[in-house]
Amino acid sequence: MLLYFSFLILIIGLFILKFLPKHLNEYLTQIALVVSSVLLVLSIYMIKTYDSNYSYFQHIFDIDLYSYSFFNIKLLFGLDSLAVLFIFLTNFLVFLCVIFLYSYNVNKKNFLINLLALQLCLFFIFSSLDVFCILCFF
């Protein structure tokens, strides 16, 4: 469930950044900082709750696309010990990038949207349990 909430928070943050006007640079950076800090806290909690004695994937959830298309696709996501560390590293680096962006006067909206979209793609790649998902998001 934690992985599902991480995906959901990141997608909501991307939509908020997409539809805010470009001249609100300070608010864009603050929203991206809040999203990245919440994801960093969730990833730390994922590390704390990860049971290394359990030999199977943890935090598993699936998305059924049966009713949305005729392809009969089921996407499966979960975490192992290496994926937990990679997701934490991704969250930490994105958090640092957003913090260091405060001092620059560039086109922050496009940069932050691309940064969070890259983070979402890395989440999908690190947590996907199907070869189809890895190929789609890579």
Image (spheres, grey):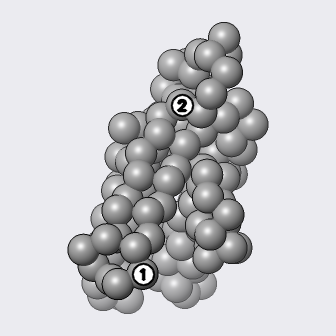
Q: How far from the left and from the top, in percent, is residue 78?
A: 54, 43
Q: Is residue 137 visible?
A: yes
In which quadrant of the rendered view does residue 25 lie? Answer: bottom left
Looking at the rendered structure, the kind of residue marked 2 is Gln
Residue under label 2: 58
Apparent side of residue 8 relative to residue 131 in the rendered image (left or right): left
Question: Is 64 rendered above or below residue 90?
Answer: below
Label 2 to label 1: alpha-carbon separation: 27 Å
Which one is in front, 80 or 48?
Answer: 80
Question: Is 131 rendered above or below residue 59?
Answer: below
Secondary structure beneath label 2: strand
Q: How far from the left and from the top, in percent, is residue 90?
A: 67, 51
Question: Is 109 rendered above or below residue 35?
Answer: below
Check the picture and name the quadrant holding the N terminus. Answer: top left
Residue drawn at the location 35% of the way across and 84% of the way down? 70
Comparing labels 2 and 1, the label whose residue is closer to the camera: 1
Q: Which of the two labelled residues, at mark 2 and mark 1, occupies the earlier sequence position?
A: 2
Residue drawn at the location 47% of the way across and 39% of the way down? 60
Apparent side of residue 18 relative to residue 116 in the rendered image (left or right): left
Q: How far from the left and from the top, in percent, is residue 79?
A: 60, 39
Residue under label 1: 71
Q: Residue furthest top?
A: 53
- Label 1 neighbour load within 10 Å: few <14, some 14-19, many 20+: few
Secondary structure beneath label 1: loop
Q: How far from the left and from the top, in percent, is residue 41?
A: 48, 34
Looking at the rendered structure, the kind of residue marked 1 is Phe
Q: Is residue 37 visible?
A: no
Residue drawn at the location 33% of the way across and 83% of the way down? 69
Q: For the residues labelled 2 and 1, say whether their Cβ atoms are less than 8 Å apart.
A: no
